[in-house]
Amino acid sequence: MHRNLGRLVCPSATRAAGIMAVVSVLAYPGAAEAAAILYGVSTISNNVYTINPTTGAATFIRNIPAEVNVTGAEFLNGQLWITDVIFGGYKTGTVDLGTGIFIPRITQPGSNTWQGLAANESTDTFYTVDLAGQPTLLSVTTAGVISPIGPTADIRGLAYDNVSGILWGVNATTLFRINTLSGAPTTIGLLGPGSNTLARLGLAFADGTLFLTSNNSLYRVNTGTGLATFIGPNGLTAAGIDGLATLEPQAVPAPEPASLFLLGTGLLGAGVRRWRRQH
């Protein structure tokens, strides 16, 4: 029987080509990412919590067997760093989230005067504000090299947006944008009612949103106006959650185009061979 090969359709090959197209659409455009996770550190219970960004509710994770005093918190390279830990003097260091053990890495020159902490991932350094005397913005390496940048505002919470390269800070009433080269603060606006306590302020970016913890509650901060919108209480009135930090998820790498091509052509070839055996 004569067959018009130009019009012949191989069902198995068609299915394989379809699978190739689906694989390309699902895997090639980019990496699959999970949501960032907010962590809070208590300066009363010395506990670490996760914070629900939708409700503000806190969930206990680990106890830190060391005294934490009005802390700043930040993740860098997947590690949780906190400041103002009384550990044979005031220290900044890392917390093992599996055990809660604090590892001192940097000796602070003063007392509990580093109440905010933010990380610049591109330079692998931290920003903090030393509140002793004239508040001063500092650059601090993970090896403990401390470099004064310049005078700034009375900042109690810090967050660095690694996408835009902007450093944000808050005190009891106000949101600031801070120049990372000079320390000069630019007032953005008042936080508004509710978030008006001097101590226990934490600031962090998560999924493009600036979050504030204050008065044991979570707020969303408008970076254009400074206004803080109430999200919800953490449910731990006596815990004193202060430091706020964001753990950004690691993206799942997308297959390389060449890998997808080989996968697709392999499926297509298998379909063609199966069709030929059947015919």
Image (cartoon, rainbow, N blue to C red):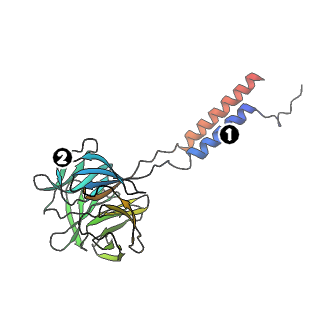
Residue at the right extreme, as displayed: 1
Q: Is residue 245 left or right of residue 102?
A: right
Q: Quick check: 254 above or below 115?
A: above
Question: What residue did someone put label 2 on?
Answer: 65
Which residue shows up at 55% across the image and 39% down it?
259
Which residue shows up at 34% across the image and 51% down it?
50
Q: Quick check: 154 above or below 140?
A: below
Three-letter code for the amino acid on which mark 2 is drawn? Pro
Which residue shows up at 15% across the image and 69% down it?
132
Residue at the left extreme, as displayed: 88
Callout 2 secondary element: loop
Residue nearest the viewer, comparing 91 with 265: 91
Q: Is residue 22 left or right of residue 272?
A: left
Residue nearest the viewer, comparing 88 with 240: 240
Question: What residue did someone put label 1 on?
Answer: 18
Callout 1 secondary element: helix
CA gap, disc 1 to disc 2? 56 Å
For residue 180, say whether it is visible: no
Q: Residues within 10 Å of mark 1 (few under 14, many from 20)?
A: some
Residue nearest the viewer, comparing 98 with 23: 98
Return the x and y of residue 232 as percentages of the image width and height. 38, 60
Return the x and y of residue 104 as percentages of the image width and height. 18, 50
The quarter holding residue 43 reads: bottom left
Q: Which quarter of the rendering shows the N terminus? A: top right
Return the x and y of residue 53 as percentages of the image width and height. 40, 57
Return the x and y of residue 87 as percentages of the image width and height. 13, 52
Q: Which quarter of the rendering shows the C terminus? A: top right
